[in-house]
Image (cartoon, rainbow, N blue to C red):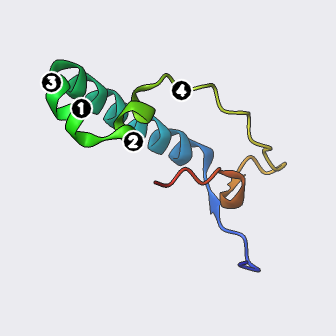
Amino acid sequence: MNERASFIPEELMRARIAQSEQLREFFIQMWLENPQMAAGAGSRVTEIMTPLAAPPAPAIPANGETVVSDIPDICC
């Protein structure tokens, strides 16, 4: 594990999350309009199309920045 923690300003983190959600909504709309494409994309598409649960609020350090390690790993 990295000994030195990296920080992402909250504003930047929220902007990245918003952009990710916009992309997710775009692809969901595309798949809803083209079910054959969605069916060909596999079970991962079905998983992506399910509504997201609200994520737990991250612990914010006193300086207002979020530690990168506090952000859950949601990779493929």
Tell whether label 3 touches label 4 (CB within 8 Å): no
Residue assigned mark 1:
38
Amino acid at the residue labelled 2: Arg
Upstream in sequence: badge 2 or badge 4: 2
Q: Closer to the camera: disc 2 or disc 4?
A: 2
Is residue 64 left or right of 50 when viewed as pictured? right
Upstream in sequence: badge 4 or badge 3: 3
Secondary structure beneath dot 4 equals loop
Q: Closer to the camera: disc 4 or disc 1?
A: 1
Amino acid at the residue labelled 1: Ala
In the image as oriented, which residue stretches furthest toward the right?
A: 62
Res 44 label:
2
Q: Position of residue 5 (x, y in %)?
A: 72, 70
Kindly identify the residue that appears in the image at 20 percent across and 39 percent down: 40
- Choose top left, top right, bottom left or bottom right for residue 46: top left
- Choose top left, top right, bottom left or bottom right for residue 69: bottom right
Q: Position of residue 61 (x, y in %)?
A: 81, 50
Of residues 20 and 43, the one drawn nearer to the viewer in this rendering: 43
Kindly identify the residue that appears in the image at 66 percent across and 32 percent down: 55
Upstream in sequence: badge 3 or badge 2: 3
CA distance for labels 3 and 2:
16 Å
Residue assigned mark 3:
34
Residue assigned mark 4:
52
Is residue 17 left or right of 35 when viewed as pictured? right
Tell whether label 1 touches label 3 (CB within 8 Å): yes
Callout 3 environment at 10 Å: few (<14), some (14 to 19), or many (20+)?
A: few
Secondary structure beneath dot 2 equals helix
